[in-house]
Image: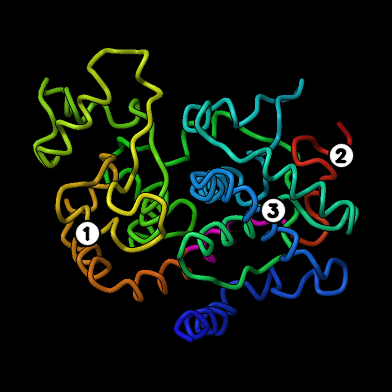
Amino acid sequence: MGYFFLSLFCFVSLSSLVQSQLDYNFYKSSCPNLTRLVKGAVWAAVKNDSRMAASLLRLHFHDCFVNGCDASLLLDDTANFTSEKNAGPNRNSTRGFEVVDTIKASVEKECPATVSCSDILALAARDSVFLMGGPYWYVYLGRRDGKVGSESAANSEIPGPSESLDKITDKFVAKGLNLKDVVVLSGGHTFGFAKCSTFSSRLFNHSGTGSPDPTLDSTLLEDLQSQCPNNASDTSTNLAPLDRVTTNYFDNVYYKNLINNLGLLKSDQALLTNNQTASMVANYSYNQYLFFKDFMVSMVKMANISVLTGQDGDIRKNCRFVNDA
């Protein structure tokens, strides 16, 4: 009953955010089984690899921050542009492309040339969160796919794990989001993993001091230094959980971890460096319902960044290539 009420609240309160561009019932007639097809494929992928849930959420986030939510991240290299997959924030770290391919193939079989890859990403992200214990929100549909990617934009516009809160906030504001969205969407780090290379500076040379980050819990620091030895390039791809307490579960423990100095990334722990964001962290740490409600709101806002609708863009037959390639 609680999740139903939360979902209903989100549906009613957010409709004004997207009704001018997207429609929850967009595929009601043209592809009525779409949500079932996506959920089934996501469930199978997550059952095989629980880490995939966080990967699909991240894929949606990284796509929306470059050219808007147009599935540009899914495009492979062409003679005309270098794929966003090669950008620093994505190279050898974004995952889930094969899952999206599988979903797209099944959708094309049932509803050819109808459903965009960008809508599939939005649905897969929602289902990934829900299947791991998180909230369920209504995904508004009708996005169309972009025809070009931008490696340079991906390098400059996607928030990084070592950036300051001010710089990350600037990047969010540039996309029409705000400081609250920074705190709420950072909560997506309540599941998933990160490479040693994304946080190793906190372990040995924080801000160029030659010493570890003093805000990092000492026990966690010791464990991470053992897992990610200094200057050991062969361990740079080792993984550590973003939330060591409930690693594969979507909940509000991420915020409790921050209060206890257990945030893995510099960008995570930076949420406590500002009085306003620290207050939000505290609120979410003891009120999971509030976090879930606000997370749904921020996800709908993010999924509406610079969307292509109507006759703009395309409906790709293969998410990796534009139709005329």
Q: 134 or 90: which is nearer to us?
A: 134
In the rendered image of this protein, does residue 21 appear above or below residue 218?
Answer: below
Q: Secondary structure at mark 3?
A: helix
| Cβ–Cβ under 8 Å for marks 1 and 3 | no
Q: 42 or 265: which is nearer to us?
A: 42
Location of residue 76 in the rendering, given as x and y in whole percent from the top left corner: 71, 29
Front: mark 1 or 2 = 1
For residue 323, the mark is: 2
Q: In the rendered structure, does residue 305 fall within the stretch colored magenta? A: yes
Q: Secondary structure at mark 1?
A: helix
Report the Cα–Cα distance between label 2 and label 3: 24 Å
What is the crowding at mark 1: few (fewer than 14 residues within 10 Å), some, or many (at least 20)? Answer: some
| Cβ–Cβ under 8 Å for marks 1 and 2 | no
Of callouts 1 and 2, which one flags the residue occurring earlier in the amino acid sequence?
A: 1
Of callouts 1 and 3, which one flags the residue occurring earlier in the amino acid sequence?
A: 3
Q: 311 or 110: which is nearer to us?
A: 110
Residue 31, quarter of the rendered image: bottom right
Name the residue: 55% across, 72% down: 137
Quick one: quadrant of the C terminus?
Answer: top right
Name the residue: 23% across, 26% down: 201
Location of residue 258 in the rendering, given as x and y in whole percent from the top left corner: 21, 53
Q: Is residue 175 left or right of residue 148?
A: left
Write the start and end of the magenta stretch as one range. Answer: 299-308
What residue is pinned by disc 1? Answer: 256
Report the Cα–Cα distance between label 1 and label 2: 46 Å
